[in-house]
Image (tube, helix red, strand yellow):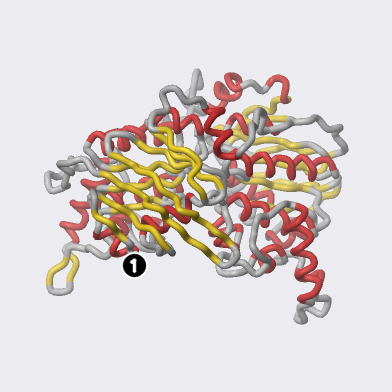
Amino acid sequence: MAEPVSDDIQQPETSHQLRFDAICKTFPGVRALDRVGFEVTAGTVHALMGENGAGKSTLLKILAGAHRPDSGNLVIDGEPHVFQSTAQALHAGVAVIYQELHLVPEMTVAENLYLGRLPASRGWVRGRELQKKARAQLAALGEEISPHAKVSSLPLAQQQMVEIAKALARDARVIAFDEPTSSLSSREVDRLFTIIARLRDEGRVILYVTHRLDEVFRICGAATVLRDGRHVETFPSLANTSPATIVNRMVGRSIDDVFHYTPRPRGSKALDVKEIAGSGLSAPVSLSVAQREIVGIFGLVGAGRTELLKLIYGATRPRSGQIEVDGKTVHIRSPGDAIAKGVVLCPEDRKNQGIIPVRSVMENLNISSRRHFSPLGFIINSTRERANAARYVQRLNVKTPSLSQLIVNLSGGNQQKVILGRWLGEKLKVLLLDEPTRGIDVGAKSEIYSIIYQLAATGVGVLLVSSELPEVLGVCDRVLVMRQGRLVADMPRDRADAEAVLRLALPIQLNSDTAVPSGACAS
């Protein structure tokens, strides 16, 4: 049982204020921020919105001390700052909780919470004190996570909560959340919003970055919109502001239907999975995807969706089952086998599994196709590689100043386009997509959907996993529902309404041997 929150956790006694004052930042070939200025006050949660590439991430990194502005400064409680390092920002009471977590996987939860501030005497860590302090911080979030557990052993949602607890352990007076709910279930989102409301009421400055408009209007009282590195508008109150107005300011145009679904005639089976069993599944799964068909998979966090894709792709070895591609039985024992058979995966975790951050856009695009340009296996034809990368950057409208730009400097939406472009040079038959628009703004989502439709129209079978039910219902021709490691429903588009899908995914009127834990909710 978690211990009660200890009395030594400090609570701020006064309200605070943050102001961005004419912030400018330029990278090679890119004006990331152009005299951005607005104010965030305590007493309300302030949303920061904009398309990918609008400058939100750069602004957060300046706030965190990871980047220095070319000009302008931060004003916290009336005092100007230009942080030279993240340590300076932390010392000034600033905490930024990024979408892509900054934890040390092989350290324990307690060690991560107090990294750099471990209680010690004579060079030895005071273990009991560390555990007590860690339990108190976790209890403040309502989490019963063992402080002794290695972070790498925790599911992604719990790692996200550890990241939040780490910021609170530093008693930050300015807290910025970057897409904090992207890996959380509804139950965890509700808990997080309760925590944010408490922090708001304590007088801390809360800056909330998200692409989810429903969250903005649920938790935020004010909002600022950036576009192309410039401040567009600040809404001091959202009470009389509509989601359509926010979207219009973000993209500079009206997007009435982000999905733009159009039906396609289906062909023969592109993928036929028969009784596949393995890690993450509680029962064998069978499914099929036709040529030119987009099949969605929806379920709770932990339902086995990602695990199923990994089994199909060969990233995890199945215990049993059979896979057919274009009507032929294939033996997939590794991702290399899958790619050779025309089955490719765009993974959920772009940062750690989808891209090589320290390499260029060109290199990331050519990871798979390089073998086609190097027939001898060791001589790289740079001319052909550059031409190939340029072709797909233009075709997919990847926003990058050059092919040599490090991919880590691109927005999430453009990174996803590069991952998709990587596979277009293959003889693609089946495309597996795991959360393809996670952390991507509404404009970039529309572009990603168009790419998916174009691929499907060429005869590719698409299997798409998403935690966003509107996305599954809006994009897919057919919807599969998973619950607790089992495939429980296969529904055509015209029968897959939100209520029906949720009723199948949630533990409602289920018997004891199939019910998911009572705390689980749709994500």
Q: Does residue 326 lie above or below 471 as drawn?
A: below
Instruction: Identify which amino acid the numbered label 1 is placed on.
Output: Gln
Residue placed most toward the observer, 193 or 21: 21
Where residue 518 appears, x then y in whole percent? Answer: 41, 28
Q: Does residue 200 lie above or below 157 as drawn?
A: above
Mark yes or no: residue 153 visible: no
Taking 103 as reference, is 286 left or right?
right
Q: Residue at x 69, y 47 (%)?
A: 432
Residue placed most toward the observer, 390 or 503: 390
- The residue labelled by disc 1 is 84
Taking 143 as reference, is 12 left or right?
left
Q: Quadrant of residue 496?
A: top right
Mark yes or no: residue 488 visible: yes
Q: Residue at x 29, y 43 (%)?
A: 205
Where residue 311 appears, x then y in whole percent? Answer: 64, 50
Crowding at dot 1, Cα within 10 Å, few <14 / some 14-19 / many 20+, comes out as: some
Q: Does residue 410 lie above or below 38 as drawn?
A: below
In the picture, the quarter occupied by the N terminus is top left
Where residue 270 appears, x then y in whole percent? Answer: 82, 43
